[in-house]
Image: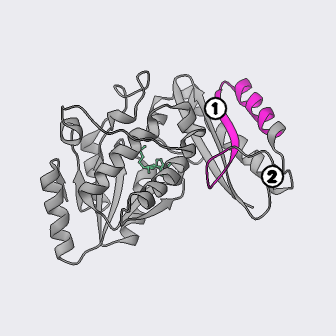
Amino acid sequence: MKQVSSIADIRSEVAELKSQGKTIAFVPTMGALHAGHLSLIRLAKEKADEVVVSIYVNPVQFGPNEDFDSYPRQMEEDLRACKDEGVSVVFTPDDNIMYGAGKRYFSINIDELNEHMDGGSRPGFFEGIVLVVNKLFNIIEPDIAIFGQKDIQQFQILSRMVEEFNHDIELVAAPIARANDGLALSSRNAYLSDEERKIAPGLYRALQYVEKQIRDGVDEPGLLLKHQQDELEAKGFKNDYLNVFSMDDMQPVIKLKPGSTYILAGAAYLGKTRLIDNIILDL
Ligand code: AMP
């Protein structure tokens, strides 16, 4: 496995693999790799000959009061995990390589896909992701890129980005990897105290409960969602959102129709830790 940090080096590594006729699957990450990331790498290996992983904590996607400084960083462990998984090249740029020191003259604007869910709660978050992924796609030019369903709004926004900016890259969504008790794996789970960790699977349970009611025939889940939010608050969560959104445009939906695809998604804090989770509803 090679580790490279400069743009020239990653380009030449990728060019070398491509000259051998190899296809490339790319897995962008912010490091602190867990079994969810590893499941993306395994899927990448199934889909292409060679896997490139990037590890870069992208400052541009963090808000001023968010956890950029405290975000878990464990490069050596991550590199070992990538090697064990058979990754070909790991790209580990720094801020200077990705953004340089100069002023930026262009900014990203995302329309209604960004209005609700994490886009609504975290101003600048998806603009920062679109910026960095766009740059990484231009640098690496993979055949395929793998992202987690855990960040479903990210996947939808990036799918539109690929279409509108004509990246010749196939995006693939990987299922959500969970702990045995149902908690979606996340690098941020490391922030949870023992007590919070016990409560944390409650978010997924609330989603599962609502999913069952919907599958049993509830087509206006508003009250049900409100009730589940109250229950989460009673358990110690501080809610951000819990709602059903249209898969196409990520807008909240009041009345569900058979034959449509929705996303049942929630975000809630336990202490300072923000948890997100979702279930796709193919009705
Ligand atoms: P991050 O390092 O948090 O930026 O995540 C890198 C990639 O891993 C993103 O595509 C995430 O959606 C994905 N990912 C994060 N957590 C999980 C999980 N529990 N299961 C599957 N994919 C995940």
Quarter of the picture containing the C terminus is: bottom right
Query: In what element is the residue under mark 1?
Result: helix
Q: Residue at x 86, y 50 (%)?
A: 218
Q: Are marks 2 and 1 in contact (CB under 8 Å)?
A: no
The residue beneath circle 2 is 214
> How many numbered callouts?
2
Q: What is the quadrant of residue 14 in the picture?
A: bottom left
Residue, disc 1: 199
Residues packed near mark 2 inside 10 Å, few (<14), some (14 to 19) or many (20 plus): some
What amino acid type is highlighted by mark number 1? Ile
- Give the percent coordinates (x, y) of residue 12: 13, 61
Nearest to the eye among marks 2 and 1: give it. Answer: 2
Q: Residue at x 77, y 38 (%)?
A: 225
Taking the spot 48% from the left edge, 43% from the top edge, the residue there is: 110
Residue 219 percent coordinates (x, y): 84, 51
Q: Could you say where residue 235 lies in the image, as x and y percent from the top left? A: 70, 27
**Residue 242 occupies which quadrant of the picture?**
top right
Q: In this orientation, which residue lies closer to the viewer: 214 or 186? A: 214
Q: How is the image coloured?
A: one colour
Number of residues whose C-alpha sits closer than 10 Å to that of mark 1, classed few (under 14), some (14–19) or many (20 or more): some
**Above or below for 232 versus 107:** above
- Magenta part of the protein: which range? 224-251
Residue 202 in sight: no
* Image position of 264 (left or right of 79): right
Q: Is 269 placed above or below 216 here?
A: above
Mark 2 falls on what kind of element? helix
The residue type indicated by label 2 comes to Ile
Q: Find the distance from the CA under tag 2 to the CA under tag 1.
A: 24 Å
Q: Quadrant of the N terminus?
A: bottom left
